[in-house]
Amino acid sequence: MMQRIRQSWSKAQVASLATALSIFAAALGGSATTPASAELALPAAAEVRVDFTADSITHGVAQGDAGVAGRPVTLDDPARVASISKLVVAIAAMRLAEQGVLDLDRDVGLYLGWPVRNPAFPDVPVTMRALLSHQSGLRDSVDYIVPLDGELSNVIANPKAWDGAHPPGSYFSYANINSPVIAAVLESAAGERFDRLMARLVLTPLGLDACYNWGAGCSEGRRAQAVTLLRPNGDLARDAAMKGPDPCAVYPATNGSCDVDALYVLGRNGSAFSPQGGLRISARDLAKVGQLLLRQGAPLLSKKSFAEMTAPVWTFNGSNGDDDKGYFTAYGLGVHWLEDNAGNRWFGHVGEAYSLRAGFWINPAQGKGFYRYVTMVDEFSPVGHCFDRCP
């Protein structure tokens, strides 16, 4: 007798297997119990939330399954948190700015050694401040994921990558493509690979078992504890359960190679470790990042740098950006601002990718924050902030 199936079977896969087993059973002159006639048990969607103050994690909820791992999800399982990754990258950028390694208002092409200019406004430099606040003029109208042996400069040279109507620094439009450029600039300025830089500047000092695209910062075997992200029908979206190192956690080279040490060149790719969305971190560890933010950046940032990072750089005035039908009202350096129904202001970031929806929000006035996520969300479900509900 076949046991209950707890993996990512699609309807087509079930039908194919059922047919094959029926033919096999008929050939033996008997019958078979197939996944089509047995109960098909998909993993339950994970629903996780932690609430925190500057000093404690005050509440935690974890229900559902950790994807296809065959066990309940916990607060300590790492999950890919999508665009919340951008906020953590901004902390690293602010640390380098504090150290004098990075100037937020310098032409980033001077760090990279290749030009980053909007062809419609060739005399206007693009700065890190503009990239972090989504006012660079770059747009997600081109493929910003670069093969391991590829050149980000070739992507940026395409006029389709740019907004031809607004000069850099003057107009907000949320775009993932900013993040690979940010990562390349950080690498060029610091002389260190992005995943290792993030571990050194943010993840390790906070005692987090976390990493970008399973790179530096995660302990050995961490990948086996991952929350696999599934689509509503159970199909795998990201992070299959795996023991040992991922044979190719980055986008492979044009010849299929995943030899990062041999092929990756600092400041030339930027996208390999997915700075826009590839942070793998548990709910409990992300709460520790939230506690840092409630402590105004301590111990990693000065109060001045924290204020510069979190203060809105852009606030919608009706014509100075794409607010995405009210979704965006204000944005800092890697920081999304919103106002709740009671008029309280929160900052943090949303995450949405691979059927995951997440929200990471801090209320500095009330000294509290929370992080929550759900998996197996229909990609056509209404998009929200995962604030009062998720999704």
Image: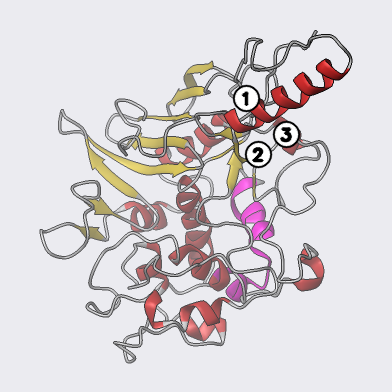
Q: Quadrant of residue 129?
A: bottom left
Say which label, 2 or 1, has the lower sequence index: 1
> Mark 2, mark 3: which one is toward the viewer?
3
Q: Is residue 277 left or right of residue 262?
A: left
Q: How far apart in space, not on screen, are marks 3 and 1 (Cα)?
A: 9 Å
* Residue occupying the point 45% across, 50% down: 87
* Residue in front for this viewpoint, 290 or 126: 126
Quick one: label 1, few (<14), some, or many (20+) residues within 10 Å?
many
- Amino acid type at circle 2 is Gly
Q: Quadrant of residue 260?
A: bottom right
Q: Which residue is mark 2?
A: 207
Could you tell me which secondary element the residue under label 3 belongs to? loop
Q: Which residue is mark 3?
A: 241
Q: Which residues are magenta?
A: 186-203
* Residue occupying the point 20% across, 63% down: 321
**At which x and y percent is residue 357?**
43, 35
* Residue occupying the point 29% across, 87% down: 120
Q: Which residue is mark 1?
A: 66
Say which label, 3 or 1, has the lower sequence index: 1
Quick one: label 2, few (<14), some, or many (20+) residues within 10 Å?
few
Residue 195 highlighted magenta (yes or no): yes
Say which label, 2 or 3, has the lower sequence index: 2
- Amino acid type at circle 3 is Ala
Could you tell me which secondary element the residue under label 1 belongs to? loop
**At which x and y percent is residue 178?**
44, 66
**At which x and y percent is residue 182?**
50, 67
Q: How far apart in space, not on screen, are marks 2 and 3 (Cα)?
A: 24 Å
Residue 359 highlighted magenta (yes or no): no
* Residue occupying the point 66% across, 31% down: 13
- Amino acid type at circle 1 is Ala
